[in-house]
Image (cartoon, grey):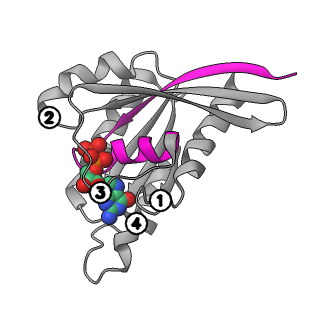
Amino acid sequence: MSRPGHFKMVLLGESAVGKSSLALRFAKGQYQDHAESTIGAAFLTHTLQIDADTTLKVELWDTAGQERYHSLAPMYYRGAQAALVVYDITNADSLSQAKKWVKELRTANGIDMIIGLAGNKADLATTVNKRKVDAREVAEYADDNQLIFMETSAKRGDNVSEIFMNVARQVAMKQ
Ligand code: GDP
């Protein structure tokens, strides 16, 4: 017998780090090179098979990263069991912004919230001088802050289902 459940998850991070692309790759297995930017927030759902007996429907809120929408963010993360905070490995500022989101989420939702941290655009790491963020340093930061950390590529698909699945598994364990 399957045990249906669902949870709310919010995507946060600076504009253009690849939040919408990760959502599209996760939910539909697709990628678009010139995705339109999200205004306000977009909503999509995807059902995951956690194990033989458990399916979990992820209700994913993709928020706009622009600073002018920042004040709207609490509306989306309030009541969310999980978040995926995204930065771009070729943009050091985007990591600082991601850390601010983590702080804000922990302050608002506490340690119970399952938070994933995605270092996106990992496919660009092979291009000389493109990488601006060291994965080992972020891994340490993630350990200290109880975050599920992976470098991802929405473009190639690397680690996308993995990071969502890891977050969902931890949510399932708490339900
Ligand atoms: P958002 O504003 O955070 O939702 O970012 P988007 O998903 O709109 O992506 C911003 C730009 O980065 C788009 O041109 C994407 O095609 C590109 N992009 C997104 N993910 C990746 C990735 O994994 N690798 C590369 N090389 N580009 C990406």
Please rate how many residues cluster around mark 4, counting C-alpha atoms within 10 Å: few if below 14, some from 14 to 19, many from 20.
many
* Residue 15 inside the magenta-drawn segment: yes
Which label's residue is closer to the chain start, 3 or 1?
Answer: 3
* Residue 151 inside the magenta-drawn segment: no
Q: Say which mark, if any, is on residue 122.
A: 4
For residue 162, side relative to residue 124 (left or right): right
Q: Is residue 67 above or below residue 161?
A: above
Q: Which residue is mark 1?
A: 140
Q: Position of residue 160 (x, y in %)?
A: 52, 52
Which label's residue is closer to the chain start, 4 or 1?
Answer: 4
- The span shown in magenta is 1-27
Disc 2/disc 3 C-alpha distance (Å): 23 Å
Disc 3/disc 1 C-alpha distance (Å): 31 Å
Which label's residue is closer to the chain start, 4 or 2?
Answer: 2
Q: Mark 1 is on which residue type?
A: Glu
Which label's residue is closer to the chain start, 4 or 3?
Answer: 3
Q: Look at the numbered disc 4 and give the secondary structure of its residue.
A: helix
Q: Mark 2 is on which residue type?
A: Glu
Q: Confirm or deny contact between disc 4 and disc 2 (CB under 8 A).
A: no
What's the residue at 22%, 25% (across, down)? Answer: 40
Point out the frontmost of discs 4 and 3.
3
Instruction: State which quarter of the image contains the C terminus.
Output: top right
Q: Position of residue 123 (x, y in %)?
A: 40, 69
Q: Is mark 4 within 8 Å of ligand 1?
A: yes
Q: Look at the numbered disc 2 and give the secondary structure of its residue.
A: helix
Q: Mark 4 is on which residue type?
A: Ala
